[in-house]
Amino acid sequence: MSENVSRLPNSLPFMRKLFYWLPPFLWMAAIFIFSTDLFSAGNTGGTVTKVLRWLYPAISEEGLQTAHFLVRKAGHFTVYAVLAFLLIRAFRSGAVVRWRRQWATYSFFIVGIYALLDEYHQTFTTSRSGSIYDSMIDLTGGACMLFVLWLLSLRKPTFTKSASASQD
């Protein structure tokens, strides 16, 4: 029994990795669920219609269809932007350095592969189909997030009075 205990990973590094890497994997699982029939256009249309009719009661049927389409595509963009953020966070793992091109490259690659796999997964569902255009929207969402994070990394760190006072 004590032999098994000694094979367990050192808890601090393991917990640190888990802290940073569990969120992107959970988010990928959520994306997988979003790609099922449960979240098909036919199943989300009623909810979007109710919200839009509440916000804008005079909206036409054509306006509802256009808005539903745009909401779904914005969802693709946003979900993969969040994935890119979580991946950069995981690669960074609390490092002092805010940005490394290698982290962004790996994150972009993972977002792209997962976007393609996601669309491929949808070809196996009954009420959905895969679309390379959706993969491009997904990849664009991830790329935009990486670009914003890169811009933020260029900012010089600001120090508060208490931090600068403690350095004197």
Image: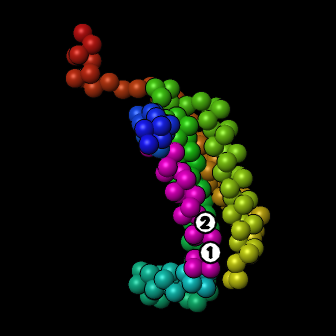
Instruction: Tell me the quadrant of the picture where the C terminus can be found.
Output: top left
- Percent from the top left, x then y, of residue 55? 41, 80
Q: Is residue 41 above or below residue 89?
A: below
Name the residue rendered at 27%, 13% in the picture: 167
Q: Is residue 21 above or below residue 53?
A: above
Neighbour class for label 2 at 10 Å: few (<14), some, many (≥20)? Answer: some
Residue 36, numbered label: 1
The answer to which image quadrant residue 30 occupies is bottom right
Name the residue rendered at 47%, 89% in the picture: 58
In magenta, the rendered stretch is 19-39
The answer to which image quadrant residue 125 occupies is bottom right
Residue contact at pointers 1 and 2, CB within 8 angstroms: yes
Question: Does the magenta-highlighted stretch encompass residue 24?
Answer: yes
Q: Is residue 105 visible?
A: yes
Q: Residue furthest front?
A: 1
Q: Nearer the viewer, residue 27 or 18?
A: 18
Instruction: Tell me the quadrant of the picture where the N terminus can be found.
Output: top left
Amino acid, disc 1: Thr
- Percent from the top left, x then y, of residue 52? 47, 81
Name the residue rendered at 58%, 48% in the picture: 84
- Percent from the top left, x then y, of residue 10? 45, 33
Q: Which residue is mark 2?
A: 32
